[in-house]
Image (cartoon, rainbow, N blue to C red):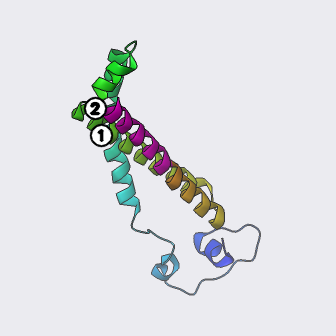
Amino acid sequence: MSETVKAAAGHNAGGPRVKMMRTTLGQVRGLGSAKTGVEHWWIERLTSVAMIPMTLWFIYSALHLAGHSRLEVAHWAANPINAAVMVALLLTVFRHMGLALMVVVDDYIHARAAHMAMLLLIKGGTTLLALIGIIATLRLAFTG
């Protein structure tokens, strides 16, 4: 943080105290909301609620399919409803995970370069993992 920002935020780490000659609005301008926090919060909540029935469906399906042959699992996955719910679950889980990890990075990584690198790694990693899961699901559903 720059000295001006520290002084405006009330931080005094033993350094000189800078008297601000700006209005309160001027002090917080550029330091406040980026106007994405509420959207991020809502998407995180919606994905968590959406995952509840899909996760229960997945657990039920996994227990029901335990011990069955690959052919029987492929027949199950060939049902369009099962394949669609599985793809929706994968998309929702990895979107939710990405959002949650971004919050951790925003809270604990303050170096700009490391922050951007971690966000890119999270977005790329969650997208890649979701694609792998979707391709595996569709391959099982269409090729048996």
Residue lying at 34% horizontally and 44% vertically, measured from the top left: 47
Circle 1 sits on which residue?
Answer: 50
User: Is 132 one of the magenta-colored residues?
Assistant: yes
Q: Position of residue 64 (x, y in %)?
A: 32, 16
Residue lying at 55% horizontally and 59% vertically, measured from the top left: 120
User: At label 1, which amino acid type do we have?
Assistant: Ala
Q: Which mark is residue 131?
A: none
| Magenta extent | 126-144
User: At label 2, which amino acid type do we have?
Assistant: Pro
Residue lying at 53% horizontally and 49% vertically, measured from the top left: 125
State which quadrant residue 39 falls in.
Answer: bottom left
Q: In this rendering, does residue 95 appear at all?
A: yes
Q: Helix, strand, or loop for circle 2?
A: helix
Task: Kindly give the residue lying farthest to the right in the view shown.
Answer: 14
Residue contact between numbered discs 2 and 1, judged by CB atoms under 8 Å: yes
Q: Position of residue 83 (x, y in %)?
A: 29, 35
Q: In this rendering, does residue 57 appear at all?
A: no
User: Is 89 one of the magenta-colored residues?
Assistant: no
Circle 2 sits on which residue?
Answer: 53
Which quadrant, please, contains the C terminus? top left
Image check: 103 left or right of 56?
A: right
Residue lying at 39% horizontally and 20% vertically, measured from the top left: 70
**Of the pair 37 and 100, the residue shown nearer to us:** 100
**Of the pair 99 and 131, the residue shown nearer to us:** 131
Tell me if residue 30 comes above or below residue 42 in the rendering: below
Image check: 85 left or right of 113?
A: left
Task: Kindly give the residue lying farthest to the top in the view shown.
Answer: 67
